[in-house]
């Protein structure tokens, strides 16, 4: 019966697996309950990173570190579709950081950092640090007034790091002024930052591979959060896998379809945003214009330094207390995040993964999340202005309020009532809010839906290829005014492809 319901794509993958063993040996099958977008946030982060790498490699073909601002302007105003590439690259980097924050927040809430996934969480935190470093380096490379002023100000602040970290940063960012080939008038550090940008990108790729290897070692997605202590790997729930339809392991084609759908979704969304909101690019009657002025030391002295949005929460500490204390707070923030799985296990001694069974962890994490948002907004609203100690005092009140309110509320009110009324054997049923079960269909109806979806998908791909090729052929000479229109259509097409794939994944099975 199962063989009759297989699509042609299932058969193709089985044929390949018999000969080359691409999947079935390195990728674990995912259970049915895991086919929801929140379980695939990691794939979305990977998609944004992939798009940033592709567009970054193309942008780098025209980037000249010895004259960074002029080469950036040249890319935007002279290179065919260069402005679109520049905008996509920037928005893809922003999407990667934003999705990474959402991904880590979700994993914290559901307890996906717990034993035996502690090292996977640590690797994820390292990845987050590398992503922020990569964004910091990339933000500086156009060498405009705002970005380079913020970059140099950040380096001055990091000079207060303890434990000889300041000396290490100075060693890596100090360039001899008499180095042969240094262009006059341009900070030679730009060239070093450009090299670091590629090195850190390579480190990100390396740690992504390590992260994915650990993920597959643990059998893929985590089981739903449970109110009872016990195993937290899918392989330990053999009875549920064999008997519960919501735990049934799905074909590999569904996994690859989900990965492809998330890639199309992120690619389409980023390209659409980059086309509708070109990053620091204005469309004028005479063509395209880069709206940011070139860095100038005189103007920089009169410009309040403000970092990009993902570093505002760090900037907040340096605006509140002396730099040496701000550096200690920042490092403590990183250390607590890095070691959070061990804090949860050995200090808080939480025994189960369900959020209501982890009151101390949820209270501490809520304090982190709220203070991150408050600090970022506060720093953005006060560029170049010292906040004073009231800043860290407010942070302290946020953490205190989180514990005073949430800890007793969860520990003494929600947990007993939830356990008493739980009829699922201790397993938190996400399916109540977003069911993955489809209506029962007979075999002929399922085949009809599947074949119709495949025909629609093939037709859409064919139409997309034809229309896109015609657009590129007809717009070669008019790229200055229409390249963002092409990006808009491309983004819509990719989102439509994601929608069709979503129908294949959720409606055809």
Image (cartoon, grey):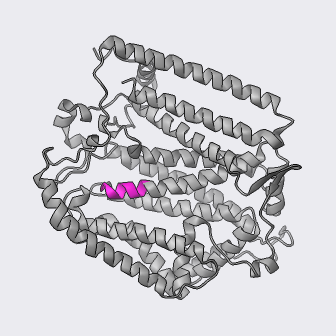
Q: Position of residue 455 (x, y in %)?
A: 52, 16
Query: Can you see residue 163?
Result: no
Q: Quadrant of the N terminus?
A: top left
Q: Please say if 201 is above or below 149.
A: above
Q: In front: 92, or 190?
A: 92
Q: Is residue 132 left or right of residue 366?
A: right
Tell me which residue sits at (50%, 64%) in the image.
129
What is the x, y in percent for residue 370?
41, 69
Residue pictured at 30% horizontal, 24% vertical? 439
* Residue 109 is a magenta residue: yes
Q: Start and end of the magenta stretch?
A: 103-111
Along the line of sight, the residue nearer the viewer: 251 or 476: 476
Left or right of residue 326: residue 54: right
Residue 403, by quadrant, is: bottom left
- The residue nearer to you, when weighing 116 against 497, is 497
The C terminus, quarter of image: top left
Position of 94 with respect to 488 (left or right) is: left
Apparent side of residue 360 relative to residue 252 in the rendered image (left or right)? left
Image spot of residue 8 (x, y percent): 44, 16
Question: Does the magenta segment cover residue 235?
Answer: no
**Residue sticking out furthest to the right:** 286
The answer, for residue 355, to whether it is visible in the render is yes
Residue at x 60% of width, y 24% of height: 461
Give the residue furthest to the top.
Answer: 444
């Amino acid at each position: 019966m199962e063989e009759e319901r297989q699509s042609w794509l299932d058969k193709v993958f089985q044929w390949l697996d018999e000969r080359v063993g691409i999947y079935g040996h390195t990728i674990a099958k995912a259970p049915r309950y895991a086919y929801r977008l929140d379980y695939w946030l990691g794939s979305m982060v990977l998609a944004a990173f992939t798009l940033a790498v592709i567009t970054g490699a193309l942008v780098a073909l025209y980037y000249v570190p010895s004259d960074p601002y002029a080469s950036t302007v040249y890319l935007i105003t002279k290179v065919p579709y260069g402005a679109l590439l520049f905008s996509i690259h920037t928005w893809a980097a922003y999407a990667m950081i934003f999705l990474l924050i959402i991904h880590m927040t979700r994993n914290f809430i559901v307890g996906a950092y717990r034993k035996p996934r502690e090292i996977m969480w640590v690797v994820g935190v390292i990845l987050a640090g590398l992503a922020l470093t990569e964004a910091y380096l990339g933000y500086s490379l156009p060498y405009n007034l705002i970005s380079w002023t913020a970059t140099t100000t950040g380096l001055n602040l990091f000079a207060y790091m303890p434990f000889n970290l300041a000396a290490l940063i100075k060693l890596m960012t100090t360039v001899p002024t008499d180095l042969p080939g240094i262009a006059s008038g341009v900070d030679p550090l730009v060239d070093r930052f450009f090299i670091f940008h590629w090195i850190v990108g390579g480190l990100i790729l390396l740690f992504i591979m390590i992260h994915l290897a650990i993920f597959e070692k643990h059998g893929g997605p985590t089981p739903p959060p449970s109110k009872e202590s016990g195993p937290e790997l899918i392989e330990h729930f053999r009875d549920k896998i064999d008997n519960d339809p919501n735990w049934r392991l799905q074909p590999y084609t569904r996994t690859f379809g989900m990965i492809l759908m998330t890639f199309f979704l992120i690619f389409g969304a980023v390209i659409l945003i980059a086309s509708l909101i070109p990053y620091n690019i204005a469309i004028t009657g005479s063509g395209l214009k880069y709206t940011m002025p070139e860095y100038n030391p005189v103007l920089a002295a009169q410009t309040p330094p403000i970092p990009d949005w993902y570093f505002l929460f760090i900037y907040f500490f340096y605006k509140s207390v002396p730099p040496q204390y701000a550096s200690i707070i920042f490092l403590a923030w990183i250390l607590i995040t890095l070691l959070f799985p061990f804090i949860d296990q050995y200090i808080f001694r939480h025994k189960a993964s369900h959020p209501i069974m982890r009151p101390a962890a949820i209270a501490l994490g809520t304090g982190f999340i709220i203070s991150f948002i408050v600090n970022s907004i506060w720093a953005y609203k006060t560029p170049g202005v010292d906040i004073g100690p009231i800043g860290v005092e407010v942070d302290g009140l946020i953490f205190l309020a989180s514990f005073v309110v949430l800890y007793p509320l969860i520990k003494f009110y929600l947990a007993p009532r939830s356990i008493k009324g739980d009829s699922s054997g201790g397993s938190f049923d996400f399916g109540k809010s977003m069911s993955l079960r489809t209506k029962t269909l007979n075999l002929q109806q399922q085949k009809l839906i599947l074949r119709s979806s495949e025909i629609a998908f093939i037709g859409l791909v064919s139409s997309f290829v034809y229309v896109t090729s015609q657009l590129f052929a007809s717009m070669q000479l008019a790229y200055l005014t229409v390249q963002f229109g092409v990006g808009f259509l491309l983004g819509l097409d990719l989102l439509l492809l994601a929608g069709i794939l979503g129908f294949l994944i959720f409606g055809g099975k």
